[in-house]
Image (tube, rainbow, N blue to C red):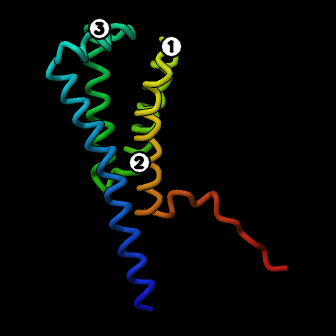
Amino acid sequence: MANHATNNRIRSMVGNILVYLPGIVVMVSSVVKLAVVPGVVHQMATMGFTGGRYALVAILELVSAGLFLYPRSRSFGLLLLSAFLGGAICAHVQIAEMPKTVGPAILLTLAWSGTWLRHPEVFWSWKKTHAAS
């Protein structure tokens, strides 16, 4: 019984790390965009994100990360964060920057893995149901 409690505590702790790490990275990325760091502005401009689009991306990034980091809105935040990071991967593919797709893919993997460790019910549809025969 104590072993099960220890496993749950470890699972929860690792899950927290895997949730907060990508959440904080994405939040910092949005703050850097909102701070209008020249290198970031240039990189975003090469992908076609200038002016209002640039600001919208930064705000969507901030909202996605914030909703994901807040436990009560985590499931909705995970969906938004997934869409956002999927879009980042797609944007890098569009301009032939394949190596730069690795970062968003890793963050996405960490976010889903951490959410699964903290909230295993997130994959409720994967559970096999066996009807009594």
Percent x, y for residue 19?
35, 52
Quarter of the image for the C terminus: give it.
Answer: bottom right
Residue type, mark 3 in image: Thr
Instruction: Answer whether residue 87 is visible to the viewer in this image.
Output: no
Outermost residue on the right side: it is 133
Q: Quadrant of residue 48?
A: top left
Q: Say above or below: 125 vs 83.
A: below
Q: Nearer the viewer, residue 2 or 69?
A: 2
- Label 1 sits on residue: 96
Outermost residue on the bottom side: it is 1
Q: Nearer the viewer, residue 75 or 31?
A: 31
- Label 2 sits on residue: 111
Percent x, y for residue 3?
43, 86
Percent x, y for residue 116?
47, 58
- Which residue sits at x=27%, y=9%? 42
Percent x, y for residue 12?
36, 68
Q: Quadrant of residue 36?
A: top left
- Which disc, if any, is residue 50? 3
Horizontally, is 43 left or right of 85 in the view? left
Mark 1 touching mark 3, by CB under 8 A?
Answer: no
Q: First in sequence: mark 3 or mark 2?
A: 3
Q: First in sequence: mark 1 or mark 2?
A: 1
